[in-house]
């Protein structure tokens, strides 16, 4: 791809000491807010939000930091939900192992899908991932263990490490929050590692990365699997929160939703997709009671974002005067 | 009863015909996608929605104005093509200088909006659209009964596919199109109005999708979801064929439709996914696609 997708990102190395402090302050406030949030908001809603936020951040790992637009991430999210629900309900696995099985399963799926998809670039990559995830959708529709249209229902939440009862909503919330934070730390560590730097160089100029001797295909596949595994982590957790896994989570609409969350929050910003996910989930919640279909709003927001608002919320904030004053650098 | 590969001959030809019908729609739609992609470098995700629009416009024309099938077959593509041209001129044209992925995302949003609106207005369930009285009934071919309307679909889609191919390969307009695909700046320097050409191309692509939609209305039911169901399969068709050549898109469409129909005879469980499996195999052997030039 000659002209990489437009991204915004903070440059860590050049950030001044004050910016580093502001960043830490924002982070501390954010975590504090999340910790006290269940006392003010409906916890199930918050848990849904955290799962989708992690899903969007995992997706952004691929789109924002590697420049690959996957149109099939629902396969990992929904697939992991099925895996987790199945091993927890049918095989009696504890929840923490169940979620890890979900993530591992998603990573396996990612390895297979990635193997085919990285053979083409750009638009073809998007179409191939879409087609393969649709194939997985049909598999889930017909396979025995997914129970077709019914999905896997009444999945027990079980006891975390054998003694923390997750049927209790507060316990469950802090467990989900912990999973989310672990996932975010992994993503942060990943994109700031040498591996992540190479991914960014592939995003910026694939040909040059090849000429520098990097095996681009292998790095892309690595990023794809990593992104799939983290999406699986989010999907498995969601299956435990709602205690079911259904076809909705593997459909192409879900792949579209996660793209919207990332686009809305800011492609290539670490924290942007969290805000994007928050907005989309809140909007869905708000419209769930009305007759008006969410699809229309989603579609219109999509078009507006693409036409006018490509940096997303956080990207615009970083690029704004206030954002620059606080020391966030905006890079094209 | 005569058997072929252990399958009754009737069932075999029946599925072959269904495959050929599906293949006709795949061919028409992937042709439109290829025409748009060739010049605009945009993958038109809204192609399925425009196909659905065609069917709906035909149905609504019949309901409200009593316009029959034959006029709808001409008018619906015109209406949808005009709508496509307006969208291209006002919105889509702003995205050409950006990464191509934004075009895909924009048309995805457009598809969601159109589909959501029709689902809101008409519900998700399908509504019947009767085939024209001239084409009801069936013909006995000796080895099977061919419903007349289905025979018409196969013939007319072949004619339209070949007609479009001739338009692009043999006419002056087609020459402009092909030249602009190679080098738009140079063609503009020769005094050709390239932006107009782009608008025209998108309009023609949308009209082709709508034409397929009107053709499909009596075969399948008219439903807001008919577009998104088919478009993903058509994407796989496009990946298999490669978007380098118009003829490639047409041939791949028919081939995969027939492959899908035959799978239904021999291994029905896999008929939903056979096209995706073929896509994966082609990606392994020939990543650029069967007829593709660009990697």
Image (tube, grey):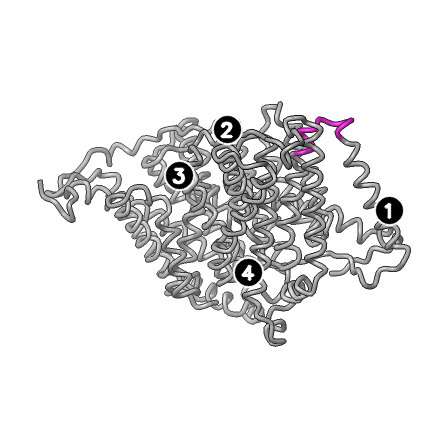
Contact? badges 3 and 1 (CB < 8 Å): no
Residue at mark 2 = A153
Same-chain check, marks 3 and 4: yes
The segment highlighted magenta reads A38-47
Q: Main secondary structure of the magenta part?
A: helix
Task: Describe residue A270's horizontal placement relative to residue B22 as left or right.
Answer: right
The quarter of the displayed image where residue B66 is located? top left
* Front residue of this view, candidates B86 and B149: B149
Q: Earlier in the sequence, mark 2 or mark 1?
A: 1
Contact? badges 3 and 4 (CB < 8 Å): no
Residue at x-position 32% and y-position 37%: B219
Q: Which residue is label 3 attached to?
A: A143
Badge 1: residue crowd in 10 Å (few <14, some 14–19, many ≥20): few
Q: Which structural element holds mark 1?
A: helix
Circle 2 chain: A
Report the Cα–Cα distance between label 2 and label 4.
33 Å
Tag on residue B12?
A: none
Give the letter of the chain under mark 4. Answer: A
Residue B94 position, x and y percent, is 64, 54
Q: Which residue is mark 1?
A: A25
**Label 2 vs label 1, nearer the camera:** 2
How crowded pointer 3 is (Cα within 10 Å; few <14, some 14-19, many 20+) is rated as few
Q: Residue tagged by mark 4?
A: A221
Q: Is residue A308 left or right of residue A224?
A: right
């Amino acid at each position: 791809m000659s002209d990489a997708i437009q991204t915004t990102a903070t440059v860590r190395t050049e950030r001044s000491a004050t910016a580093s402090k502001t960043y830490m302050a924002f982070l501390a406030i954010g975590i504090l807010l999340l910790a006290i949030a269940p006392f003010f908001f409906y916890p199930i809603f918050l848990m849904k939000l955290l799962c989708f936020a992690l899903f969007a951040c995992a997706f952004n790992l691929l789109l924002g930091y590697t420049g690959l637009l996957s149109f099939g991430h629902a396969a990992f999210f929904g697939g992991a939900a099925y895996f987790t629900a199945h091993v927890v309900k049918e095989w009696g696995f504890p929840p923490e192992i169940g979620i890890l099985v979900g993530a591992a399963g998603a990573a396996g799926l990612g390895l297979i899908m990635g193997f085919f998809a990285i053979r083409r670039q750009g638009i073809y990559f998007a179409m191939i991932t879409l087609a393969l995830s649709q194939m997985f959708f049909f598999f889930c529709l017909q396979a025995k263990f997914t129970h077709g249209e019914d999905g896997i229902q009444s999945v027990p939440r079980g006891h975390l490490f054998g003694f923390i009862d997750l049927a209790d909503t507060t316990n469950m919330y802090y467990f989900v929050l912990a999973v989310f934070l672990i996932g975010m730390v992994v993503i942060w560590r990943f994109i700031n590692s040498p591996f992540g730097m190479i991914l960014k160089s592939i995003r910026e100029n694939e040909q040059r990365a090849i000429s520098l001797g990097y095996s681009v295909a292998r790095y892309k596949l690595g990023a794809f699997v990593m992104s799939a595994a983290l999406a699986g982590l989010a999907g498995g957790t969601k299956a435990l929160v709602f205690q079911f896994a259904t076809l909705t989570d593997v459909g192409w609409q879900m792949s579209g939703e996660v793209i919207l969350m990332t686009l809305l929050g800011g492609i290539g910003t670490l924290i942007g997709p969290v805000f994007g996910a928050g907005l989309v989930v809140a909007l869905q919640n708000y419209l769930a009671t009305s007759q008006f279909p969410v699809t229309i709003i989603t579609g219109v927001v999509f078009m507006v974002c693409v036409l006018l608002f490509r940096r997303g919320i956080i990207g615009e904030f970083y690029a704004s005067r206030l954002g620059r004053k606080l020391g966030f650098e905006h890079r094209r | 009863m005569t058997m072929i590969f252990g399958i009754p001959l009737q069932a075999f030809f029946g599925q072959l015909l269904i495959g050929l019908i599906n293949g006709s729609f795949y061919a028409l739609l992937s042709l439109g996608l290829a025409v748009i992609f060739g010049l605009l470098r945009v993958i038109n995700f809204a192609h399925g929605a425009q196909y659905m629009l065609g069917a709906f416009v035909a149905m609504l024309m019949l309901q409200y104005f009593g316009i029959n099938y034959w006029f709808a077959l001409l008018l619906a593509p015109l209406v949808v093509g005009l709508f496509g041209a307006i969208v291209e001129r006002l919105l889509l044209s702003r995205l050409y200088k950006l990464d191509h992925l934004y075009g895909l995302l924009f048309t995805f949003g457009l598809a969601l909006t159109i589909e959501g609106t029709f689902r809101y207005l008409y519900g998700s369930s399908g509504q019947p659209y009767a085939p024209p009285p001239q084409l009801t009934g069936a013909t006995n071919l000796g080895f099977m009964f061919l419903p007349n309307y289905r025979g018409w679909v196969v013939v007319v889609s072949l004619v339209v596919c070949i007609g479009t191919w001739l338009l692009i390969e043999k006419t002056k307009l087609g020459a402009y199109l092909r030249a602009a695909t190679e080098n738009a700046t140079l063609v503009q320097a020769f005094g050709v109005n390239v932006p107009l050409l782009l608008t025209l191309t998108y309009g023609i692509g949308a009209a082709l999708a709508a034409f397929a939609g009107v053709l499909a209305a009596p075969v399948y039911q008219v439903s807001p979801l008919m577009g998104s169901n088919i478009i993903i399969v058509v994407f796989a068709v496009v990946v298999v064929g490669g978007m380098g050549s118009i003829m490639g898109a047409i041939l791949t469409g028919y081939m995969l439709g027939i492959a899908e129909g035959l799978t239904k005879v021999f291994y029905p469980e896999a008929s939903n996914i056979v096209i995706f499996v073929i896509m994966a195999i082609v990606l392994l052997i020939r990543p650029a696609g069967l007829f593709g030039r660009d990697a």
